[in-house]
Image: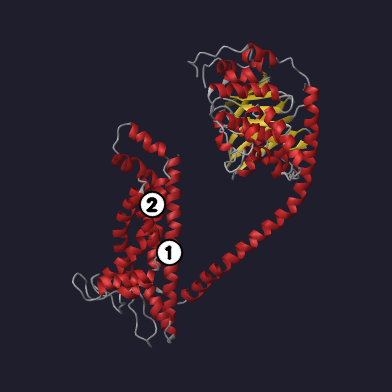
Amino acid sequence: MTVMAADPVVARRTEIQQTAQRSADRRQLLSRFGLLACRICLLIALTPLVALLVYVFIRGASAWNWAFFSALPHPAGIPGGGISNAIIGSLIIDGIAAAVAIPFGITAGLFLSQSDGRIPGLLRLAADVMSGVPAIVVGIFAYVVLVLHHPGSLGHYSGVAASFAIGIVMLPIIIRASETAIRGVPSVLSEAGLALGARKATVATRIVLPAALPGLITAVLLAIARGAGETAPLLFTAGGAQFLANSPLKQMNAVPLVIYQDGIQAYPDIVRVAWGSALALVLAVLVLSVGSRLVSARIRRVRDV
Amino acid sequence: MSDMTPAPPRPEVITATAVDDTRDTDIPAMTLRNVSVAFSGKHAVRDVSFDVPTNQVTSLIGPSGSGKTTLLRALNRMHDLTRGANVTGEVKLGGLDVYAPTTRPMLLRSRVGMVFQRPNPFPTMSIYDNTVSGLRFNGIRRKSLLDEAAESALIAAALWDSVRGRLKASAGTLSGGEQQRLCIARALAVEPEVLLMDEPTSSLDPSATKRIEELMSELKDRVTIVIVTHNMQQATRVSHHCAFLLMGEDKAGELIEVGPTRKLFTEPSDPRTEDYVNGRFG
């Protein structure tokens, strides 16, 4: 039996190993080409990104000084001036938008993650469609609702109208990203809680949401980064201003607006302000993205130990 | 584990695994010399040396965390895939230095196959395609060789009779035990010289476990087997040789004792081995 079985096995083993050897030789060449192709594609894909960052940095850094962040804009023709009103305006607009969108978004994400069926499916579809709606459409919608004259509207440009528009941009991002984060929590955890007699709400708040925290933080920070960079909704709503409004119910300036308005001016000093603002915006978004990774990585590490 | 009544040993298997079966054992299939595995600088296995006898079953036993699986995965360079993992020492497959820079891991792994804890047939492939997948990955196209290897591997894995009529069916239609035997067939089809099995029955029910254990004593004529097991009865039932690992200081697994299974379980030379095989800890 042993002799009968061993011979064909040894014969096959020899043929297989010889073929594998030849095939590996061939594939080694192919794999070098493949790896090279991957690297070239990566390089091509990264080139515009890196070029953009470098260019923004070079153009923007020359505009930066203390006054750039602390002073109000100067009129055309007078060098210097800053964007303090736009920075504070952006913080207020995006802050209000995030403060409203985050609780609604996470709650909706939690709901979607816990439910399957037709209604949740429709809501999920709605969130997907919403995240695909061009920001300029969101802008004109907010314009009609809060800027045009009619009952229930403020009737003029305002920070709050801008927050409304930016919030609409943030909302679907938070919903879908937090749903994904919450769905990533192993179901054995919620089952363990339910098996101890906990209510679904208790399981959600005490077990599932804390476990999903790193993903939720990422979801929120990425949504804020996305909202902070949106310009089209602001064009219809914030109105822009050369000064700092004392209330979000009034017309406000924002960093993306400065880039849009100043970038196309004829005066080099004003164009420089636009590049300085662009750099500030890029860095802010970068800090949010890197920060979200660091925070969630840290939470994961602390929990593992 | 300690409070479980040991299952009565099945005598016919014990005789099949008699340690005096020394045929073909003069040249070890694999040799390990001072093998250490570290993850990001922290040792998980330290300074292990022993020989894996050819055409026999060698079991790695020891409590959780003793580095059994880590050591097993060092034998076919699976740690290459883990970032921060570093294997030192010497592992040899016959005359081949497993960790030599000129050794290609893919070719090595076609000679040292692996079966995992949970059955992992490729879900998008049929039973036949699963069985010959390793051959295809290695560039074997000749239909008659594929068919011949598939049939032989499925027969060896005791699966041929139940699947010969539905080779084109999805692997997902098989039961858990059958899936694991399909994974064994898949590993065997490449005709490896050594088969590594990482707790291959830990997710199976007792009858499926029994079939796989029976398989192992039949397979040893074809392939050298190294098996990691938590179950000491399993080690006595299936293995001729046995290596006992224990977590040493700084949590690195160390080899305490290696030798014929019967000797380890009846007259161990180290008191820690005696404690473990008698269920006093671990």
Q: Position of residue B52 (x, y in %)?
A: 71, 27
The residue that label 1 is drawn on is: A285
Foreground pick, A84 / A192: A192
On what subunit does the disc labeled 2 rest?
A
Residue type at tag 1: Val
Circle 1 crowding by C-alpha within 10 Å: few under 14, some 14–19, many from 20 = many
- Image point (43%, 82%), residue name: A264
- Residue A82 at x, y percent in the picture: 36, 77
Decide which of B282, B14 is in the foreground and name it: B14
Q: Which residue is drawn at 32% across and 67% down?
A: A165
Q: Which residue is drawn at 45% across and 53% down?
A: A294
Q: Residue A136 carries which label?
A: none
- Cα–Cα gap, marks 2 and 1: 20 Å
- Crowd tier of the residue under label 2, counting other residues whose Cα lies within 10 Å: few below 14, some 14–19, many 20 or above: many
- Chain letter of disc 1? A
Residue at x 36%, y 58% (from the top left corner): A126
Q: Which of B63 and A105 is in front in this view?
A: A105
For residue B192, what is the image quadrant?
A: top right
Mark 1 element type: helix
Q: Which amino acid does the dot numbered 2 rest on?
A: Ser
Please indicate whether residue A91 sits to the left or right of residue B236 in the image: left
Percent position of residue B36, x then y:
64, 35
Residue named by callout 2: A178
Q: Name the element at disc 2.
A: helix
